[in-house]
Image (tube, rainbow, N blue to C red):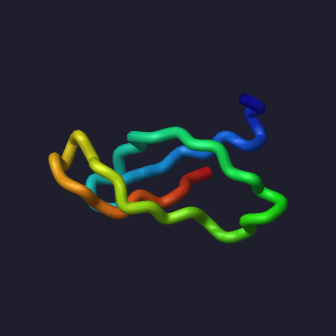
């Protein structure tokens, strides 16, 4: 995995970074938003890409 394509996904409710993922930054310019399970909150919440 190259470091330049690696992103962190942070829960929008508790602000805890829970997931890491890959992203093609040349094709996707806007920030990624995915609904995923947050182990801290204990439910499915929106996760937003962070820097």
Depth check: 41 or 26 in front? Answer: 26
Residue at 49% x, 65% y: name it. Answer: 33
Left or right, residue 46 beside residue 27: left
Q: Position of residue 15 (x, y in %)?
A: 35, 52
Q: Residue at x 61, y 65 (%)?
A: 31
Where residue 9 appears, as percent x and y from the top left, is: 48, 49
Residue that lies at the very extreme toward the right in this rendered image: 26
The image shows a total of numbered marks equal to 0
**Figure quadrant of the N terminus:** top right
**Viewed as shown, does residue 42 lie left or right of 19?**
left
- Which residue, as the protein is rendered here, is positioned at the far top? 1
Q: Residue 6 placed where, x, y %? A: 66, 40
Q: Please state if 34 lies on the left or on the right of 14 as rendered.
A: right
Residue at image coords 39%, 40%: 18
17 horizontally vs 51: left or right: left
Which image quadrant is residue 46 in?
bottom left
């Amino acid at each position: 995995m190259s470091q330049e394509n690696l992103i962190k996904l942070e829960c929008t409710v508790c602000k805890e970074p829970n997931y890491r993922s890959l992203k093609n930054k040349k094709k996707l310019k806007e920030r990624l938003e995915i609904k995923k399970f947050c182990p801290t909150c204990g439910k499915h919440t929106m996760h937003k890409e962070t820097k």
